Amino acid sequence: MEILLATGNKHKAFELLKILPLKTNSGKSIKYLTLADFPSTPEPEENGKTLADNAIIKATFGLKLAKIPTLADDTGLIVDALGGQPGVHSARYAFKDKADYAANNEKLLKELATTPANQRTARFTTVAALALPNGEIILKEGSVEGTIAQNYLGEKGFGYDPLFLVKDANKTMAQMTAEEKNKISHRAKAFLQMAEKIKKLN
């Protein structure tokens, strides 16, 4: 069985492949493809109003492209002091036309420059979508609470990981090993639920 991970982000794909099953409950082997296997195909425009909207857009796009079950997600960083921003615009917070991790982080630090530590609460939320050839779409969600650090901490992970201090962990996601992150992260919580659905596919 082949399943498409509808992402061109190699860091995200690496994380997901540590979570997702390699066999179904019936013993059928699963091979995962990514958008890197379709290099001439542009990624779809993520113009949904919610994380679920964008996850569905990407999953259905991949299904039409590859004609195989397609797994996608959308993740948002929700910062309370910013009224929930960057939220659905997290990947393109600094520039509307492209994703730029460094610029996103710099903008976030600038926006929170005068916000005291006890008011920098935030959460990461991921919505995962699995689009199946029969037209069914399965959604799963995961979140993790934390605060936004005042400086960069750690060199692992990607995106906002160096600024996101995980609640009760006393470290950012960028200071965690892949194994630690996959035990508590928003993406892991969503995809561990999705993994159970994938195991049941025929």
Image (cartoon, rainbow, N blue to C red):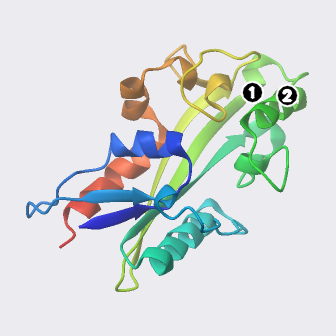
- Residue underneath mark 2: 112
Residue depth check, mark 1 versus mark 2: number of the one nearer the observer: 2
In front of the other: 201 or 28: 28
What residue do we see at 60% from left, 15% from top?
154
Rendered location of residue 167, percent (x, y): 54, 24
- Residue underneath mark 1: 120
34 relative to 61 in the view: left or right: left
The mark total stands at 2
What residue do we see at 55% from left, 74% from top?
61
In front of the other: 145 or 171: 171
Rendered location of residue 134, percent (x, y): 34, 86
Mark 2: few, some, or many residues within 10 Å (few <14, many ≥20)?
some
172 relative to 13 in the view: left or right: right
What residue do we see at 89% from left, 28% from top?
110
Rendered view: 38 above or below 122: below
Point out the residue furthest to the left here: 26
Q: Which quarter shows the C terminus?
A: bottom left
Rendered location of residue 14, percent (x, y): 43, 40
Q: Which quarter shows the N terminus?
A: bottom left
Please tell me in which quadrant of the rendered image residue 32 appears: bottom left
Q: Earlier in the sequence, mark 1 or mark 2?
A: 2
| Disc 1 + disc 2, Cβ < 8 Å | yes
48 relative to 182 in the view: left or right: right
What residue do we see at 23% from left, 59% from top?
30
Q: CA distance from mark 1 to mark 2?
A: 8 Å
